[in-house]
Amino acid sequence: MTFGLPVEMVYNGRIVRGMMGPFEHSPERQFAMTVNKRAIAECSDINALKQVSQNLLEGWSSMNTALQSMMLENMQLRQAIDKRNIDLQAAEEMMNEAASTIEQYEKRLKKAKPSLWPFGW
């Protein structure tokens, strides 16, 4: 079973909505779900039920915090990659400009007189 998470973020100064995923449920998650469902089903004491629900709440809270951290890291990584691409484009433009300037100087040098003295000895 796969699922995705809707995401809204500010990217390059504009709001972008997207989907993270698809994610697949892991065998570990399935095991945890089975264990917790069984604990709830077999629970007959209200105090034991409270303990199970607190454990589930703490687990959910930890997973939610981890998910938010991963989403933030993902957005920061995308922004860093985008900035790197912009920097690479700017560097390429500078290299092309430098190459064209060198070509212009080479053309001028070929047209110049081959002597050391410009007034022609």
Image (cartoon, rainbow, N blue to C red):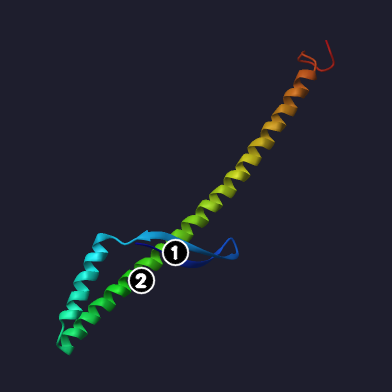
The Cα atoms of the two marked residues, 1 and 2, are separated by 12 Å
User: Tag on residue 64?
Assistant: 2
- Which residue occupies the foreground of this view, 36 or 74? 36
Secondary structure under badge 1?
helix
Horizontally, residue 94 falls left or right of residue 115, namely left
**Labels 1 and 2: the sequence-earlier one:** 2
- Which residue occupies the foreground of this view, 62 or 52? 52
Secondary structure under badge 2?
helix
Residue 40, image quadrant: bottom left
- The residue positioned 14% from the left and 88% from the top of the image is 45
Report the quarter where the N terminus lies. bottom left
- Which residue occupies the foreground of this view, 58 or 22? 22
Residue 67 x/y as whole percent: 37, 66
Total numbered labels placed on residues in the image: 2
Asked if 55 appears above or below 45 in the picture, the reply is above
Asked if 5 appears above or below 101 in the picture, the reply is below
Asked if 118 appears above or below 76 in the picture, the reply is above
Report the quarter where the C terminus lies. top right
Horizontally, residue 29 falls left or right of residue 66, namely left
- Residue to which mark 1 is pinned: 72
- Residue type at mark 2? Asn
Residue 41 x/y as whole percent: 19, 80
- The residue positioned 48% from the left and 67% from the top of the image is 7
- Which residue occupies the foreground of this view, 75 or 21? 21
User: Tag on residue 117?
Assistant: none
Horizontally, residue 2 falls left or right of residue 51, namely right
